[in-house]
Amino acid sequence: MSETPQGFPTDPGNELIFANEHVRVWAMTLQPGEAIFYHSHQYDHLILWPHPGRAASMEFDEEEEFSHAQNAEAGYAFFKTVGRQGGLKPHRLKNLEDHPVTHYIIELVRESATEEPGKPQSNGRGLSGRNHDIIDPNDFVEPKEKRVTYAWG
């Protein structure tokens, strides 16, 4: 497990599923009521909730515990650039469900796309207690009639 100079882990999940020189994919599975350790994101990343789930988060220096609610619908996606200043502030997440929940963190293993941490973006398939922009993913793909279709086989 890697750490920041302050000793916080930089692994954003509890299982590394895939890694190469471009991307790392982590799973974070939390049991009912379980909270993951404080950790700091060092790379721009996408968080994907394939199934619905409720969680709450808190940053290291916050006094009120788990005050930022997150209610994810199936397919909730949340993107964050971390900036080039040493990663994001350490935070942790707690499962508010009465069953295990899993979400995935896809890290882009390269220098951040922004100098300062950017405003997070989501696809709007859920609610977050953190201020972020909701974007329409269709605004970032070619129109269907211009897409190339590949046949495998």
Image (cartoon, helix red, strand yellow):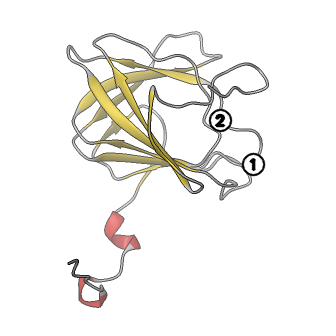
Q: Is residue 132 left or right of residue 43?
A: left
Q: Secondary structure at mark 1?
A: loop
Find disc 2 in the rendering and name its residue: 88
Where does the image place residue 14, in percent across and percent down from the top left? Answer: 45, 25
As displayed, is residue 70 above or below residue 62? below
In the rendered view, does 19 fall on the left or right side of 7?
left
Q: In x, y percent, where is residue 30?
A: 34, 19
Q: Which residue occupies 54% across, 52% down?
A: 20
Which residue is more in the foreground, 59 or 17? 17
Amino acid type shown at disc 1: Arg
Between 35 and 56, the residue placed more toward the observer is 35
Element type at mark 2:
loop
Q: Eyeballing the image, is 99 above or below 21?
A: above
Return the residue at label 1. Answer: 84
Residue at 66 percent of width and 55 percent of height: 110
Marks 2/1 in contact by CB < 8 Å: the verdict is no
Quarter of the figure that contains the N terminus: top right
Residue closer to the observer: 118 or 144: 144
Q: Residue at x 77, y 43 (%)?
A: 85
Q: Residue at x 30, y 15 (%)?
A: 31
Q: Position of residue 12 (x, y in %)?
A: 52, 31
Q: State the quadrant of the C terminus.
A: bottom left
- The amino acid beneath tag 2 is Leu
As drawn, the residue found furthest toward the front would be: 153
